[in-house]
Amino acid sequence: MDELNRHFRVVIPARFESTRLPGKPLRRIAGKTMLEHVYAIAKASGAGEVVIATDDARIVEAAKGLGADVVLTAADHPSGSDRIAEVVSLRGWTGDSVVVNVQCDEPLLPPQLIDQVAGCLSEEGDLATLAVPLSADDPFDDPNVVKLVMDGRGRALYFSRAPIPYHRDDPATPRGMYRHIGLYAYRVESLLRLCALPPCPLEQTERLEQLRALHAGMRIDVDVASAQPGPGVDTPRDLEIVENLMRVAT
């Protein structure tokens, strides 16, 4: 890990409202709220500080019950990045410091991936993220599985919901495809710049915020994940799947 990034911070954006799963951070899995699972994962990483950022008093109360550092943010943030940017501004974190966005719907995220994405952010990078190779058994044509392509230096070229790269002679194979993992490390000054920019046409078309960064010429460093993350939680069915996986693991 770069010396620059050793003392990174984690912010967990935890929004109460969710179209498919209202109150998602407070839903219980294996006897604990999802917020508690994700907070424990973040605390198990090498982060020097872990902050929960939310728009709801119920989540504030739950976070305080965990002994967590929590910030009540504005309710109208369009994304988790904007919520983190408010925390960054309130706390006065320096522009060259590193903050990792750990989403509150990833209760099976290996803690080492948080350390890895922080260490992946180079001194010249604006953001860093992770990816895993896709196999023929993966739903690589599913638009909910975000794919990415990178250059020979490990920098992101593009993210898409479509299968990329497209194999003209064998379109049924995912050879060379990578699934994007929604885990980001930001340089604080880059995060604030990103959130100050208007959405770009590509972002609006694909509904992928990271395309705004690429459109603005920002550098996104990418590393292949050192561990396979478990599934995230977006629906009641996802809750059942994750709970079953946790039961098997114990």
Image (cartoon, rainbow, N blue to C red):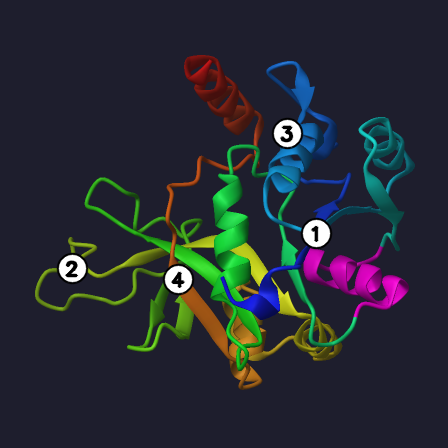
Q: Which residue type does callout 1 highlight?
A: Gly
Q: Is residue 21 visible?
A: no
Residue 211 horizontal/vertical position (percent): 52, 72
Query: Residue 171 location, x and y as percent?
Result: 16, 59
Find disc 3 in the rendering and name its residue: 37
Q: Quadrant of residue 97?
A: bottom right
Which of pointers 3 and 1 lies earlier in the amino acid sequence? 3
Above or below residue 72? Residue 130 is below
Decide which of 32, 51 is in the foreground and name it. 51
Residue at which label 1 appears: 48
Front label number (3 vs 1): 1
Q: Earlier in the sequence, mark 2 or mark 1?
A: 1
- Helix, strand, or loop for circle 2? loop
The range drawn in magenta is 76-93
Report the residue that reaches farthest toward the bottom: 217
Please name the residue that numbered disc 2 is placed on: 171
